């Protein structure tokens, strides 16, 4: 039996003042499909901003093109909308022009790992002091559920009705190879771990950080693969997540279609801004001679 709560008795959303729509209209507005994980991710980000009293002007958000294009409605901070795949390039410009800022580039897996792969790689190579938040749901959800480069082999999408026959790209391996100084992966079934990693990447770490979060898309990925029920897909993600330490003891066959989660790498080395400041400082010293 369902219970209807009268409108005047409904509790306020705890992060209404933090979200864009909350600040503008006094209420939280979301246009995501029922069961989509992106709303939960947005709320986690709101909590990070709220709990840490982050200055919205210091931590701007760069948002690209995809299902998550609607996520700024329920995000904190100041958001800049940019072209498909170009988030890291825009974030690099923001960081170089305003070294005191720490931009967050939110991208989908199709966005960052197809048209935007080169920008991803070079931002990591340069060690730009930014966070790339990778939303991973295995499909291009906004435009009909086409397969993304992260689609598992043999699984189905609108553009692969008989199964995906290509090798899958791994964002964590790509980031490590490109030189990222902080790399972590979690899922919507691991909210506390995700928030802890995101807080570390945003506040404590200096350098390029990749924080990947695997999210459910029941409308396209789930429905095409007989998991259209949001709870069923959420549980599939949770049940198939393997901690990085346990994964080290498992074979490649055992890890097929598994989601390896955890913190993969952390190191400190000079950021792009710091290295260019060295040039500026040396030029200033030359002028004073």
Image (cartoon, helix red, strand yellow):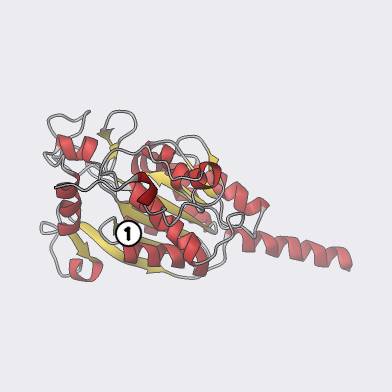
Identified at 45% across, 62% down, the residue is: 48
Q: Nearer the viewer, residue 191 or 8?
A: 8
Quarter containing the C terminus: bottom right
Horizontal and vertical percent position of residue 148: 29, 38
Horizontal and vertical percent position of residue 211: 39, 57
Quadrant assignment, res 263: bottom left
Q: How many marks?
A: 1
Give the vertical position of 245 relative to 16 (above or below): below
Left of 127 or right of it: where is 177? left
Identified at 32% across, 59% down, the residue is: 185
Which residue in the rendered view is the most extreme toward the right? 289
Left of 52 or right of it: where is 187? left
Identified at 28% across, 49% down, the residue is: 215
Q: Dot 1 corresponds to which residue?
A: 185
User: Does dot 1 land on a helix, a strand or a loop?
Assistant: strand
Horizontal and vertical percent position of residue 140: 31, 35
Quadrant assignment, res 235: bottom left
Can residue 177 be seen in this snapshot?
no
Q: Nearer the viewer, residue 162 or 167?
A: 162
Give the vertical position of 77 relative to 184 (above or below): above
**Dot 1 alpha-carbon crowd within 10 angstroms: few under 14, some 14 to 19, many 20 or more:** many
Identified at 29% across, 48% down, the residue is: 5
Quadrant assignment, res 247: bottom left
């Amino acid at each position: 039996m369902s219970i209807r709560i009268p409108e005047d008795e409904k509790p306020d959303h705890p992060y209404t003042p933090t979200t864009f729509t909350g600040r503008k209209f006094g209420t939280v507005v979301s246009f995501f499909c029922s069961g989509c994980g992106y709303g939960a991710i947005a709320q986690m980000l709101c909590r990070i901003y709220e709990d840490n009293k982050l200055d919205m002007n210091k931590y701007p958000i760069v948002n690209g093109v995809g299902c998550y294009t609607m996520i700024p409605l329920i995000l904190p901070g100041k958001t800049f909308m940019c072209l498909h795949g170009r988030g890291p390039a825009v974030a690099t410009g923001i960081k170089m022009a305003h070294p005191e800022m720490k931009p967050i580039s939110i991208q989908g897996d199709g966005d960052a790992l197809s048209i935007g792969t080169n920008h991803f790689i070079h931002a990591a190579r340069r060690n730009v002091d930014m966070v790339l938040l990778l939303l991973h749901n295995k499909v291009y959800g906004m435009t009909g559920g086409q397969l993304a480069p992260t689609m598992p082999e043999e699984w189905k999408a609108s553009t692969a009705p008989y199964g995906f026959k290509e090798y899958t790209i791994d964002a964590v391996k790509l980031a490590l190879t490109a030189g990222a100084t902080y790399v972590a992966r979690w899922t919507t079934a691991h909210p506390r771990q995700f928030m802890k990693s995101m807080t570390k990447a945003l506040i404590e770490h200096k350098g390029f950080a990749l924080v990947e979060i695997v999210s459910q898309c029941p409308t396209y990925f789930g429905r095409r693969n007989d998991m259209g029920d949001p709870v069923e897909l959420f549980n599939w993600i949770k049940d198939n997540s393997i901690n990085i330490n346990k994964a080290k003891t498992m074979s490649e066959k055992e890890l097929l279609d598994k989601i390896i989660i955890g913190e993969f790498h952390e190191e400190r080395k000079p950021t792009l801004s710091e290295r260019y400041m060295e040039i500026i400082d040396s030029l200033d010293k030359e002028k004073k001679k």
